[in-house]
Image (cartoon, rainbow, N blue to C red):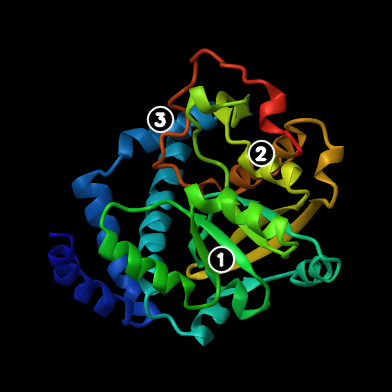
Amino acid sequence: MQKVVFYIFYPFIWLLSKVAFPVLYVISDFLYFVIFYLVGYRKKLVLSNLKRAFPNKPEKEILKIRRKFYHHFVDIFMEMIKTFTISEKQMMKHYKFKNLDLLENLAKKGKSVIFIGSHYANWEWFISVNLHLDYSFYASYTRISNKVFERKLKKSRERFGINMVLTKDTIPTIAKNYKENKIGFYGLLSDQSSEPYKTYYWSDFLGVRVPIHTGAEMLAKKYNCTFVIMEIDKVKRGYYEVAFELVTEHPRDFADYKLTAIFLEKLERQIRKKPEYYFWTHNRFKHEGKEEVKQPVKVLFEKK
């Protein structure tokens, strides 16, 4: 059945991915109208998230941000489809990396790197980083239910040279490279809501007390990886820039959760500056008000 679904839908996806960018965004505008005005996909949730994050903004401004977000949200969906057939030349034109020399210098020092990022702007096209640098980049991803689609999607993402690793295989991959003294650059998105029973750390994010993912910090400390924040900015429609910020080459020198707090503070500033480019359809504040379950710090940050 999964193969049947794949062979029915994939030809349409492939044809859609072949259209020129101007046409792609005309289609995106039409889909925005359908999704926002006719279907109303998660409109109440998005509105609730925005009101929680920006309680002092007037209703009119909140509604304006929501409309802008849905335009961007549909654009991202269309750009993900475009990934199937986008050329290297097109990708390098639409997705630029600003300070790659930072990564080159770290590689020369023999440093492995944990990149921590968020669901902001277009995180999907980070897969093009190997068009610029010839190092072993790994990106963690979550499995989708249709295995046939998953294989095709993984192949599409990896055609620029990046290694896609299932979330469950991320730690074993880093551990193996660490044991074999292999340099690895690992990209993790760490801004979504963590389950309370798995959480070691709660903090205020956009003014709301929520459980926080700390996996990136844990991995950086356990495997002594350089900790780098990747900030993705939307320059204009269809064009993005990625900047890297070195936080530390010595993560074990930082107090527990300090690296995570630095990332969250920087992300919050970015969101407040241009809120329409954040991923508001996720129920980011669903655990607000729940009991904070404390876990032993030594379990999280064990170095051996």
Sequence order check: which comes first, mark 1 or mark 2?
1
Residue tagged by mark 1? 126
Estimate how packed mark 1 is, as few (under 14), some (14 to 19) or many (20 or more) residues with alpha carbons within 10 Å.
many
Residue at image point 16% right, 71% down:
7
x and y percentages locating residue 84 in the rendered image: 37, 75
Nearer the viewer's eye, disc 3 or disc 2? 2
Question: Where 297 falls versus 245 (above or below)?
Answer: above
Residue sitting at x 22%, y 71%: 10
Which residue, given by chain and number where applicable, does mark 3 sit on?
48
Mark 3 Cα shell of 10 Å, populated few (<14), some (14-19), many (≥20): some
Q: Quadrant of the N terminus?
A: bottom left
From the viewer's perspective, tell me whether residue 13 is left or right of residue 207: left
Q: Badge 2: how crowded within 10 Å, few (<14), some, or many (20+)?
A: many
Sequence order check: which comes first, mark 1 or mark 3?
3
Number of the front mark, 1 or 2: 1
In the image, residue 10 above or below residue 70: below
